[in-house]
Image (cartoon, rainbow, N blue to C red):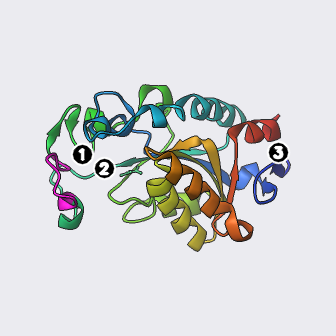
Amino acid sequence: PMPTLSVDARPYPFTFDPATTALVVIDMQRDFMEPGGFGETLGNDVSLLRSTIEPTAAILTAFRAVGIPIIHTREGHQPDLSDLPDAKRDRGNPTLRIGDEGPKGRILVVGEEGQDIVDELKPLPGEPVVDKPGKGAFYATSFGDLLAEAGIKSLIVAGVTTEVCVHTTVREANDRGYECLVLEDCVGSYFPEFHRVALDMIAAQGGIFGWVAPSASVLDALE
Ligand code: C5J
């Protein structure tokens, strides 16, 4: 077994036991990240998210090599939209709603091309993919049970977007007793200011929600 590892992080070093740690890759979906996807049709600059792909791919490779479990999430709804609250569908009175036909299939519907994970970060067989109807990974999913069954205590987090699904998931995890390290170059936002401040909010007050570090610090710790 590997010893407890220490990562240079803020507000202070993050220590984790690889045997009780999982990597969580949140919502790296085509509709958020790809040119021509739903996110871009809303006027977002997807290049701000695409910078997360290369470092996250490197972290996936490293974690697969040492056998640390990896869980992927996708924001998405059942085809009958039974798990989509009206409040979420209608918010902002958009021209394209969740469930409508978008540029890459029905928007945020499970099984559609746009709802799937980008090819560069494709899950391997055996890595759980959790579809979640909310922003947080715990709400109305099997995510919490998966972690409990595997005896996971610490989460290392990548994904998009920093201030929405990453933040909600980290906050949910924090209240459930998990230690969370967020990889600053493996999370991204359409709003650079929100990204920066969201990371500051995690590490403030002695790590009120967890820790923040560049992925290179984790790779160093694994060497
Ligand atoms: C995620 C969103 N994944 N921004 N969703 O953050 O709506």
Labels 3 and 2: the sequence-earlier one: 3
Give amino acid for label 2.
Gly
Q: Which range of residues does the magenta coloring cover?
A: 89-99
Q: Is residue 17 left or right of residue 175?
A: right
Tell me which residue sits at (41%, 31%) in the image. 118
Which labelled disc corresponds to residue 76?
A: 2
Mark 2, other Cα within 10 Å: few <14 / some 14–19 / many ≥20: many
| Numbered disc 1: secondary structure | loop
Label 1 sits on residue: 109
Cα–Cα gap, marks 2 and 1: 5 Å
State whether the magenta stretch is mostly helix, strand or loop.
loop
Label 3 sits on residue: 2
Cα–Cα gap, marks 1 and 3: 40 Å
Furthest toward the front, the residue is 193
Asked if the residue under mark 1 is in contact with the one under mark 2, i.e. CB atoms within 8 Å, the reply is yes
Tell me which residue sits at (46%, 48%) in the image. 161
Labels 1 and 3: the sequence-earlier one: 3
Q: Does the residue labelled 2 lie within 8 Å of ligand 1?
A: no
